[in-house]
Structure formats: structure tokens, C-alpha cells
């Protein structure tokens, strides 16, 4: 023991309260490290300083065992007092960084604790995405991975300036958990994929041969691609993609029914072999198949061949029979195929089983009888609903509206447009996209469906292509990543100074461009084998030209790097006290702000020769996040931070009373500016199936106003006990029960329900009357 | 779910069973409001209807 009154330090108290031996070398090393970081080399000096620290500690701590924090405070004090200012600064920086990392680790563990022990009802993190069930094992595992990845990237991958802006809510880097892994979404051209078959990575599937296989493989393609990307999956040409399946099905069913007819009317015992041989011969001679619409010469040729062995009357009977039943059975098979597709897309799993694929189907413009049949049956299956008549949640249907194709009476698919309105009035899908909006029409080339704009479910749109102007198309492309700016924050901080507002907006846009480029560089370094389906099967444009070990950067350039924004309404409120729904001045300023952002994206496109675009952000998790931070920072500001959400992109606030047509007129000009995607919603009251005229009027108003993509919302409630679907207030209009209440069996039976109720059917069932309604209510397919 | 109405000794159907309320969230539909996060839940609550009265006879009502 040393002389004097001081106790020699032998132990220190660690942060977790445990004791550890005091080691002076650790102090020496920390000081030497800080000195090296500022250019110093003197190890002896570091040792001397460490001894000074020990001495000071012995003087100040007395008999108490010093804590780690006390030791570090003393190091700082000694460094400063002895004139080592630069080393002291480095030491403090290092210490702060370690503190931040430690806090993050603690925070991550707290997040994990909540994920583990709280239900999704108590835990908002588990409800970040409504289509992930956070209460399941796989859903929770997904969140562990996601939350851990976010913190890892924040600490070690992101540029600290980007991390800070994201953390503090100036910007929001969407899908941060996938930062180093993949890209957002893709429009899958199924026609190309099905040609000669494809592999899912787990097995090879040959080219499908009837409509049922076509629809089943469509689901598998969506599911497989969903596992390679973090966003949604869309089919841009569902009608065109499925039509060959119907063609093949009809051909087969015509042959099968011809065989039956030969047996019945022609007394042919070798009928199946004969039908096969006859079909082969006629197909070879005419170069045609039996087809849904007829009129291609096949029937006449077949009749002629049949008449070599059968009399005229028998030939006519056989032909009539074959056509009648081939037609009927093709229709039925197509309905079943579409029904199975809707069921599959609502039940099949992706991402470790926690999520059903986020699927979208675009269709509306194929005027072939087969394509039309596909759309008709898909719409009818959607109208009928799931097993107990429930509204299907997926896929998102997007009906492409086009003048001359389906918009006006006399257009070849006008009947399907009407049907789309009827189904949407009941099921909220389809949404409607408008190919005649000038910014969509400029790409449209008749006869080239790849030039028809396709939307990705929630709104993403990819059309122009600076990297290859010969391919300004929808197929095989998608968004790479997007980051949103917090518009209301900039407005609050500007205190009404518009010049400052635009300057700060520019600073934020610069930051976002920089961050998108950083992320793009990471994405470019990935290889084809990292995306076995998206790239390995040639789904992404030009990826078929790459080998499994090639980097994907060159072909990723077909995708978009996108700036987004939310809360234009709150931004305008903060700037001038009114939003664009209530004032023309605000509308003009709103257009100026969004127009400026678009201009900056166009400039970045030119500068970097990459597809930068502006999106009206579909804020789900973000809607509450920005405002929560802003309310803490800036307090409760009426009209700005006084609700629990910022308004979606450029929308007129949901709480503001405005007519449907005025809302459409106000929002339409923003569609042209947001080339990375947009959507407008109208909320209809009442049951729109009772007023299809009004429903269609709203769709037409959207088209005439120059909206690119729109949808109509209305309440869809359902009582699982009596099966009533419609609007339910407090009381079910059919069976009269309140939520959670029981209803007497006799009452249900009086309504024609539960007729077969007995001890083995205890429980609540779908409404049998509604089941009976689920007959395909066919439109007349116009024969060409 | 079956329980007995004690007075009538009659089976009651549906006790504890809620109504399904399907709403659109971020472009897609959700079968129950329970899955909405807090911000979206507040937003859904505030939504008002947009009248189409200038064109067709649909009931006009603001419910916020």
C-alpha cells in the first residue's frame, strides 16, 4: 500500500453495477487512442496522464469505489487542465459516440422486449404495416429482424448526416430495414415469364397449358418475386397475360366435347382417338385453333372433314354440341380459375409466412374475346367475395380506363367498364387508372400494351426512362427506393418566410438526392444470385442478359430513385394559415411547392442520368411519425400538429368537408407533377351499389379532370352471424343484433338462415342465401 | 358461439362476435381497424364523406 491518506484504487463500478478490477492500462490506451486520432504519437505521455488520472481519482473518490463515468470525467478534466485540448476533444467525441451506441443497444433491447411481451393492440410497432400480423411467431420474428437491421444501418452504414436527418424526422428513409438488401417493386410481365416455363428457385414449372394453370402460376410468380423485394408486386397486363390460357382451354374443351358428340351422335366407339386425330388434321390444314369467338374458319374446316364420314345432319349436331359445351365449360373453368386466384392471393404467404403478398393487377384494354372473358370472370369472382362472402383484401385491381377502348358507349370494352364500376361499388376494387391523362397519354402507343401506364397498388408509377428512351414502358420496371421530406416541419421553422422555406426545402432535397444515390450504389453492388427470381428469371428488364455472378447495377438503372412528401395541407396551414382545399392562394402555393420538387427531380435526372422522380408518398407508418416528433419539438399548432397524423401527400385533409367534384378538381393538377406515383380518393356515403350512376359520375369526373389514378372509398361492413354486407351502424340491419350480442336462433331462422342448424353445426356460419347469390352473372361476350 | 337465453331456453347465436369493418388503408384494404397503427386510426376516424349532390341524388352527410 502506498503512503499517505489515500486509498489505492483497486476496483471500479461498471455501468451494469458489477465490480471490475481497475486497470490503468485501459486509461492509457484510451488516451493514446484519442491522441493518435489528433495526430499524436507519444505513448509515454499518455501513460503519464493516466497516472495523473489515477492520482486525481484517489484524491476525489475517497473511500468509495469510482464508477466508469467518474473515471471518464476525470480523464476529460486531466486532459483539459494539462493543455491537451485537441486530444480532449477527440476523447469526448469518442465517449459520446460510445454512449450513443450503448443507448441504441439498450433501446433495441427495449424494442425487443416490447415485441416479445406486448400484443399488437398495445404496441404500435407491431402495427406499422396493417398487412403483417405482428402477433404471430413469424410476424414477430420479422419485426426483430427489421428493428435490428434499422439500428445496425443507422450506426454503421448510413452517412451520419442522413442518419441524423432520418432520426430527427427531417426526412424519412422508407424501408430502411432493407437498405443494403434489395429494391422496392416490379411490374411483372407474365407473358414473358411463362414463355418456355420458369423456375421458382425451388423447382421448375413448364409453360402452362390451361387457364387454371395460368392463374395458379400468376400467383406463384407474384409470391416468388415478393420474396426478392421489399415493396409490392404488380402485373401490368393481367388481361393480355391470361388470354392465351383461355385460348388453350377452349381448344382442349372443344376437342373433348367433339369426342363426346362423336360417340353420341356418330356412334363412334373410338371417339377420343378420332377427335384427337381430326383436331390435329384441321389445325394443320387451317393453321388455326378452335376459338371462343368462332369465325376464323376452323369450324367450317372441321365440318368439312367430319362430312367425309358422317351425314350432314350429324355433322351439324356434333359441331353445335362441341361449340355449345366448349363455350359453357370454358366460361365456368375461367370463373373457377379467377376465383382460385382471388382466394390464393388472400391466403398464400410470403416473407417467412407473416404477410400475404402485396399484389396488384392492371387490366382493362385487351379487346380479344379471351382477354375479355378473363376480366369479366375475375370481376365476377371478386364481386362474389371469399368463402363466406367476405370482401377480398387482395389483389388490388386497377382498371385501365381508355377512350376508344372502354370509356364510352360503343367502345369494345365499355361493358367491362360498367361492370368494373358495379364491382368497385360493392368491393372497393377495382381502382381506376386513366390512360388519357396527358402525362400518361404521351407514352401510349396503340397495339403496344407495354406503353400503357401501370400502377403499383398503392400508387407507384414508372414510365419515362432517361437511361433508355426507346423503352419508356411499364413492363419489368419499378421503384428502387424512396425517401420523403417532412414538409410541415420546414414550414413551421420558416415562420412564414417563403424565401427561407424554399431554401431549406432545397437543402432537404439535396440531402435526399445524396442519400438516394448512396443507397443506389449499395444496390448496384448486388449480384443476380441475390435475386434468384427478379433477376435470375429475367423478370426485371434486361436482367436476362446477365449471368448469375454479374452485378445488377447496369440493369437497375431502368428503375426510379424517388423523392416523396407528406403533409402538403399542414405545410400550407403553417405557411399562410389555410390549406389548398379552402383557398386558391394556398392552392397556387401548393402547386408551386410541389412543382419545385418535381423540377429538382428533373434536374437530378439530367445531372446523374438516372430516373429521379417525385412521388405523392403513401404514408402508412409515416403518417403518425413525423407529427409526433414535431409536436414534441414545436408544440400543438392548430391545423398543423393538432391531429395524430399528417395528411397523405397532396390530399385535401380527410376532415375537411368538400364536394367530390371540388376535391377532384383541387387534387388533379398534382397528379401531373408527381411522376413517381399518385392517387386520389373520394369517400362516398351510403351504399353506392344503390346508386351506380353517382359512382360512375365520380370516376368520369376523375378522368375528365386529368387525374392519373383514383379510387372511391365507402364503408364495407359485414355481420358474420347473419352474413349481412353493407353499412352497419350500431345495429345490424338484418338480424338486429349489436356488436358482440347474441341473436335468438328462431329469429335467424325466420330470416331464412340457419335452416340446418343442429348440434353438429353449432357456431356461426356464412349466410347460405348469400352463398346462393354467388352465381356468375355473365355479361354477354360480344362475338367478333 | 352458442349460449342459452335462460328465460326461453333458446340457443343464442353470435355472442362475442364482432362486426367486420373493411376500410382502405394505404391503397390496400384491411379487414379490421385493429390492424391500423395509431396515426392511421386517427386519420380513418376523421374521414368525412364527399357529396356528389350536384350530379346525382346521393344522401349528403358530413359525419366528422
Image (cartoon, coloured by chain):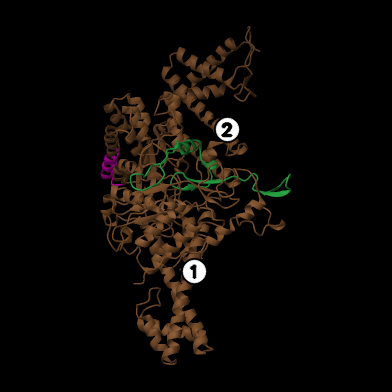
| Picture coordinates of residue B42, whole percent (x, y) | 48, 35
| Picture coordinates of residue A324, whole percent (x, y) | 45, 77
Callout 2: chain: A
Q: Nearer the viewer, residue A269 or A235?
A: A269
Residue matched to label 2: A110
How packed mark 2 is, by other alpha carbons closer than 10 Å (few <14, some 14-19, many 20 or more), is few
Residue matched to label 1: A332
CA gap, disc 2 to disc 1? 55 Å
Q: From this view, report whether residue A429 is shown above or below residue A493.
A: below
Callout 1: chain: A
Inspect the magenta stretch and tell me whether residue A614 lies in it: no
Q: From this view, report whether residue A632 is shown above or below residue A224.
A: above
Q: The brown chain is which one?
A: A
Q: In the image, which residues are magenta? A: A597-610
Residue lying at 43% horizontally and 30% vertically, measured from the top left: A168
Task: Name the quadrant of the C terminus of chain B.
Answer: top left
| Picture coordinates of residue A553, whole percent (x, y) | 37, 50
Residue B45 visible to the viewer: yes
Q: Chain B is drawn in which colour?
A: green
Label for residue A628? none
Answer with left or right where residue A529 lies relative to residue A559: right
Tell which tag, 2 or 1, sits nearer the viewer.
1
| Picture coordinates of residue A163, whole percent (x, y) | 42, 33
Element assignment for label 1: helix
Amino acid at each position: 500500500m502506498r503512503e499517505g491518506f489515500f486509498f489505492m484504487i483497486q476496483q471500479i463500478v461498471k455501468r451494469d453495477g458489477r465490480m471490475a478490477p481497475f486497470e490503468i492500462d485501459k486509461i492509457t490506451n484510451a488516451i493514446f487512442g484519442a491522441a493518435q486520432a489528433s495526430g499524436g504519437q507519444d505513448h509515454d505521455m499518455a501513460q503519464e496522464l493516466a497516472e495523473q488520472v489515477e492520482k486525481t481519482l484517489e484524491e476525489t473518490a475517497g473511500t468509495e469505489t469510482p464508477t466508469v463515468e467518474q473515471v471518464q470525467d476525470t480523464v476529460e478534466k486531466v486532459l483539459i487542465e494539462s493543455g491537451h485540448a485537441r486530444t480532449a476533444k477527440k476523447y469526448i467525441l469518442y465517449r459520446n459516440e460510445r454512449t450513443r451506441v450503448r443507448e441504441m443497444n439498450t433501446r433495441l433491447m427495449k424494442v425487443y422486449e416490447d415485441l416479445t411481451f406486448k400484443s399488437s393492440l398495445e404496441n404500435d410497432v407491431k402495427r406499422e404495416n396493417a398487412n403483417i400480423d405482428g402477433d404471430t411467431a413469424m410476424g414477430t420474428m420479422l419485426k426483430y429482424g427489421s428493428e435490428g437491421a434499422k439500428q445496425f444501418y443507422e450506426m454503421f452504414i448510413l452517412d451520419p448526416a442522413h442518419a441524423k436527418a432520418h432520426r430527427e424526422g427531417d426526412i424519412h428513409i422508407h424501408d430502411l430495414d432493407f437498405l443494403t438488401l434489395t429494391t422496392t417493386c416490379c411490374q411483372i410481365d407474365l407473358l414473358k415469364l411463362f414463355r418456355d416455363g420458369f423456375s421458382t428457385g425451388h423447382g421448375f414449372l413448364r409453360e402452362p397449358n390451361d387457364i387454371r394453370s395460368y392463374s395458379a402460376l400468376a400467383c406463384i410468380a407474384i409470391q416468388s418475386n415478393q420474396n426478392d423485394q421489399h415493396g409490392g408486386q404488380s402485373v401490368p397486363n393481367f388481361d393480355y397475360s391470361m388470354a392465351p390460357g383461355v385460348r388453350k382451354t377452349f381448344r382442349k374443351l372443344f376437342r373433348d366435347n367433339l369426342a363426346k358428340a362423336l360417340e353420341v351422335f356418330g356412334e363412334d366407339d373410338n371417339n377420343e382417338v378420332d377427335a384427337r386425330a381430326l383436331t390435329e388434321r384441321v389445325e394443320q390444314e387451317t393453321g388455326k385453333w378452335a376459338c371462343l369467338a368462332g369465325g376464323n374458319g376452323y369450324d367450317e374446316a372441321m365440318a368439312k372433314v367430319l362430312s367425309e364420314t358422317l351425314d350432314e345432319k350429324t355433322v351439324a349436331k356434333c359441331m353445335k354440341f362441341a361449340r355449345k359445351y366448349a363455350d359453357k365449360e370454358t366460361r365456368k373453368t375461367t370463373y373457377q380459375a379467377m376465383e382460385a386466384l382471388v382466394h390464393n392471393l388472400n391466403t398464400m404467404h410470403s416473407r417467412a409466412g407473416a404477410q400475404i403478398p402485396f399484389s396488384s393487377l392492371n387490366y382493362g384494354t385487351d379487346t380479344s374475346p379471351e382477354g375479355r372473358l378473363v376480366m369479366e370472370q375475375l370481376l365476377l369472382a371478386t364481386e362474389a367475395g371469399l368463402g363466406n362472402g367476405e370482401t377480398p383484401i387482395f389483389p388490388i385491381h386497377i382498371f385501365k380506363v381508355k377512350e376508344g377502348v372502354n370509356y364510352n358507349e360503343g367502345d369494345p370494352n365499355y361493358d367491362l367498364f360498367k361492370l368494373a364500376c358495379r364491382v368497385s361499388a360493392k368491393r372497393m376494387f377495382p381502382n381506376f387508372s386513366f390512360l388519357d391523362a396527358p402525362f400518361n397519354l404521351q407514352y401510349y402507343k396503340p397495339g403496344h400494351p407495354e406503353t400503357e401506364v401501370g400502377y403499383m397498388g398503392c400508387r407507384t408509377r414508372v414510365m419515362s426512362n432517361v437511361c433508355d428512351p426507346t423503352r419508356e414502358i411499364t413492363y419489368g420496371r419499378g421503384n428502387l427506393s424512396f425517401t420523403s421530406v417532412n414538409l410541415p416541419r420546414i414550414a413551421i421553422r420558416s415562420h412564414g418566410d417563403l424565401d427561407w422555406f424554399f431554401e431549406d426545402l432545397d437543402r432537404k432535397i439535396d440531402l435526399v438526392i445524396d442519400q438516394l444515390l448512396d443507397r443506389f450504389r449499395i444496390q448496384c453492388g448486388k449480384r443476380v444470385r441475390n435475386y434468384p427470381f427478379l433477376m435470375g428469371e429475367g423478370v426485371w428488364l434486361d436482367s436476362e442478359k446477365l449471368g448469375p455472378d454479374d452485378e445488377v447495377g447496369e440493369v437497375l438503372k431502368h428503375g426510379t430513385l424517388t423523392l416523396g412528401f407528406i403533409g402538403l395541407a399542414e405545410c400550407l396551414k403553417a405557411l399562410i394559415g389555410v390549406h389548398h382545399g379552402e383557398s386558391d392562394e394556398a392552392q397556387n402555393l401548393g402547386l408551386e411547392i410541389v412543382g419545385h420538387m418535381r423540377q429538382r427531380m428533373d434536374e437530378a435526372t439530367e445531372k446523374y442520368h438516372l430516373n429521379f422522380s417525385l412521388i405523392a408518398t403513401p404514408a402508412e407508418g409515416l403518417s403518425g411519425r413525423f407529427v409526433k416528433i414535431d409536436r414534441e419539438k414545436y408544440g400543438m399548432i392548430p391545423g398543423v400538429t393538432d391531429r395524430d397524423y399528417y395528411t397523405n401527400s397532396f390530399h385535401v385533409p380527410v376532415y375537411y368537408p368538400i364536394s367530390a367534384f371540388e376535391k377532384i378538381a383541387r387534387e388533379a393538377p398534382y397528379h401531373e407533377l408527381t411522376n413517381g406515383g399518385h392517387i386520389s380518393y373520394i369517400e362516398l356515403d351510403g351504399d353506392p351499389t344503390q346508386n351506380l350512376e353517382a359512382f360512375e359520375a365520380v370516376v368520369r369526373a376523375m378522368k375528365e379532370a386529368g387525374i392519373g389514378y383514383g379510387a372511391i372509398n365507402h364503408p364495407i361492413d359485414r355481420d358474420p352471424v347473419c352474413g349481412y354486407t353493407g353499412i352497419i351502424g350500431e345495429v345490424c340491419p338484418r338480424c338486429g343484433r349489436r356488436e358482440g350480442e347474441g341473436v335468438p336462433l328462431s329469429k335467424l331462422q325466420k330470416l331464412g338462415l340457419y335452416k340446418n342448424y343442429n348440434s353438429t353445426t353449432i357456431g356461426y356460419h356464412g349466410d347460405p342465401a348469400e352463398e346462393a347469390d354467388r352465381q356468375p352473372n355473365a355479361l354477354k361476350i360480344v362475338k367478333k | 358461439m352458442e349460449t342459452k337465453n335462460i328465460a326461453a331456453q333458446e340457443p343464442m347465436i353470435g355472442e362475442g362476435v364482432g362486426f367486420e369493418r373493411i376500410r382502405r388503408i394505404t391503397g390496400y384494404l384491411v379487414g379490421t381497424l385493429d390492424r391500423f397503427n395509431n396515426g392511421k386510426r386517427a386519420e380513418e376516424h376523421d374521414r368525412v364523406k364527399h357529396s356528389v349532390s350536384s350530379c346525382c341524388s346521393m344522401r349528403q352527410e358530413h359525419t366528422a
